[in-house]
Image (cartoon, rainbow, N blue to C red):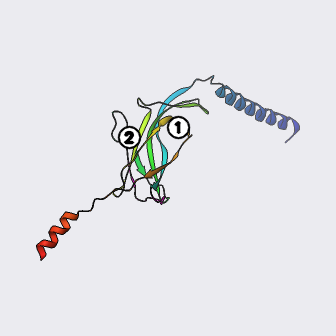
Amino acid sequence: MNKKQIKIFSSIIAAAVLMAGLFVMADYFALFGTKTELKLGFVEARFRTLNKDTGALVIDVGVRCFQKHTMDACTRRESHQAGVVAAHFPVRRLVTSTLLFKKSEEFIKPADPKMHVMLMHQNYNNPTKTILLENIYSGKETEYTVEMPPRAWAEPQQDIEDDEDEYE
């Protein structure tokens, strides 16, 4: 290749790089427009469950979430940690983007900003924890500690005495 061909080739490469740079810069400043999409997803909150009397971890705890007008507002997911229950809450997001860049993302707030989470276990009273969804959406609080009071089982003394009388 002679010098003239190298000069033409390098000017073509420089023009292509310049055009690509101008395209990226124009898209960054949204000169080609933006689009807004509604995306559905989940956010997670974790609940560490402890026995109120002993402080020991409580395992195999179920989750039930409810809000105003919604009885099943979350799903339980495996946390893969002993004594920790993970709950996933549905979330709607508005995402504004250009051809190459994501410009903004905002959460659509539900009608009721409070989520009531009931932690269920057959040997414990079922405490209800009320949390603000804004804290979960923003990532401020994602793990909560919940003390579960053991259920007071009444001893059926009268039934035992009646059974003993029948066998005598």
Point 60% across, 24% down: residue: 32
- Element at label 1: helix
Specify the label residue 135 is tagged with: 1
Which amino acid lies under the numbered mark 1 shown in the image of this protein?
Asn
Residue 18: image x %, image y %?
A: 75, 30
Is residue 84 depicted above or below 29 in this figure? below
Farthest residue to the bottom: give it: 168
Give the residues drawn in magenta, as a range: 53-67
Specify the label residue 145 is tagged with: none
Residue occupied by mark 2: 73
Q: In this view, does 66 lie to the left or right of 1?
A: left
Residue 114: image x %, image y %?
A: 43, 35
Q: How crowded is mark 1: few (under 14 residues within 10 Å), some or many (20 or more)?
A: few
Residue 25: image x %, image y %?
A: 69, 28
Q: How many marks?
A: 2
- Element at label 2: loop
Point 68% across, 31% down: residue: 24
Residue 73: image x %, image y %?
A: 38, 40
Q: Is residue 14 left or right of residue 53?
A: right
Q: Quadrant of the C terminus?
A: bottom left
Q: Which of marks 2 and 1 is nearer the N terminus?
A: 2
Which amino acid lies under the numbered mark 2 shown in the image of this protein?
Ala
Is residue 30 depicted above or below 166 in this figure? above
Q: Quadrant of residue 165?
A: bottom left
Point 86% across, 35% down: residue: 4
Is residue 73 depicted above or below 83 in this figure? above
Q: How far apart are marks 2 and 1 (CA)?
A: 16 Å
Front tag of 2 and 1: 1
Q: Is residue 65 magenta?
A: yes
Nearer-the-camera pick, 81 or 131: 131
